[in-house]
Amino acid sequence: MATQTLPHQPLHDLDEWDDFLEGRYKEGKSEEEFRVYDATATPGVAEFYRQNHENMTVDYVLAKEAEYFSLNKGQKTIWEAAEFLNTLVDDSDPDTDLTQIEHLLQTSEAMRRDNQPRWMILTGFIHDLGKCLCLYGEPQWGVVGDTFPVGCAWSNDIVFPEYFAKNPDRLVPRYQTKYGIYEPNCGIENVHMSFGHDGYIAEVMKPYLRDESLYMLRFHSFYPWHKHGAYDHLCTEKDRSMLEWVLKFNQYDLYSKGHTKPNLAELKPYYDDLFAEFLPPTLAW
Ligand SMILES: [Fe+2]
Ligand SMILES: [Fe+2]
């Protein structure tokens, strides 16, 4: 299948961001140690966050939500969506790197080994399918990266907060208060999150999956919330009870990477059944 790479992207590939997270949140690391990730240590990642933080405005998010949340990119099965995502290859060593499908399978298979519920294993498999946004021409900074609410004050728990200095929303006073355009405890489901692969896949799956699953999808990169406890003032009791599932999910997303390539042909029948149990044959993307 034809492959596509975009020019002028600060990350070597999308996995570079995942690797950054894995290092940043290595188990047992203290809050102080997170801070050693600065522009000199990881210049590509820093440049990526600079682009993200400077461009992720309320207007940008609303425009992207209007464009993608109407799901008008056509019908695809889960396998077709996964194959499509697999066309996103990187230029690094093909022998050691896993394909996108292999990353998804490693996540879901780790859940399966731990006897997690079937809906969670499904969630593990689909969680990064929204990265196909890159194949629609979206820049890296609009696809991956830690997510955060727009339209209210940025938390200092967002990585590289200094890069918000040049975000145009800085000049909009009502976006700069604690609650901004939101009400206290309005629920994070009702908040406009920075645009990326998380929100997109959650929209695709919204009609079919339970809340726990949708929270895992929508908020899996919302590290300021699920790792640092920020934005609790926007949360409801429901959000707080869903947090435990998001955290449970996060363990698998961050730490399930291994070097053994999952055997797709062997696993396919199990996943065919799993998709059929929860999802229609094709979905709107
Ligand atoms: Fe992700
Ligand atoms: Fe992931």
Image: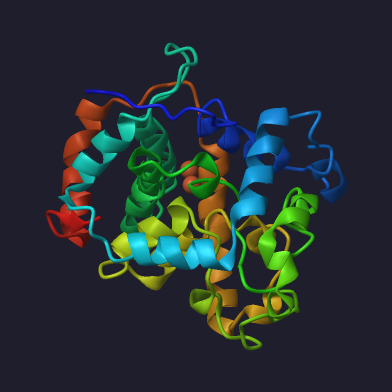
Work out which residue is located at the far left of the displayed protein and give it.
281
User: Can I make out residue 118 in this image?
Assistant: yes
Residue 219, position as x, y percentages in the image: 52, 61
Position of residue 232 in the picture relative to residue 38 (left or right): left
Q: Quadrant of the N terminus?
A: top left
Residue 215, position as x, y percentages in the image: 47, 66
Res. 43 image quadrant: top right
Position of residue 207 in the picture relative to residue 249 (left or right): left
- Above/below status of 170 relative to 101: below
Residue at point 66%, 64% (across, down): 225
Residue at point 38%, 32% (across, down): 100
Residue 209, position as x, y percentages in the image: 31, 66
- Above/below status of 152 relative to 99: below
Work out which residue is located at the far bottom of the displayed protein and give it.
183
Q: Considering depth in this image, is 125 or 193 the residue closer to the camera? A: 193
Residue 151, position as x, y percentages in the image: 63, 73
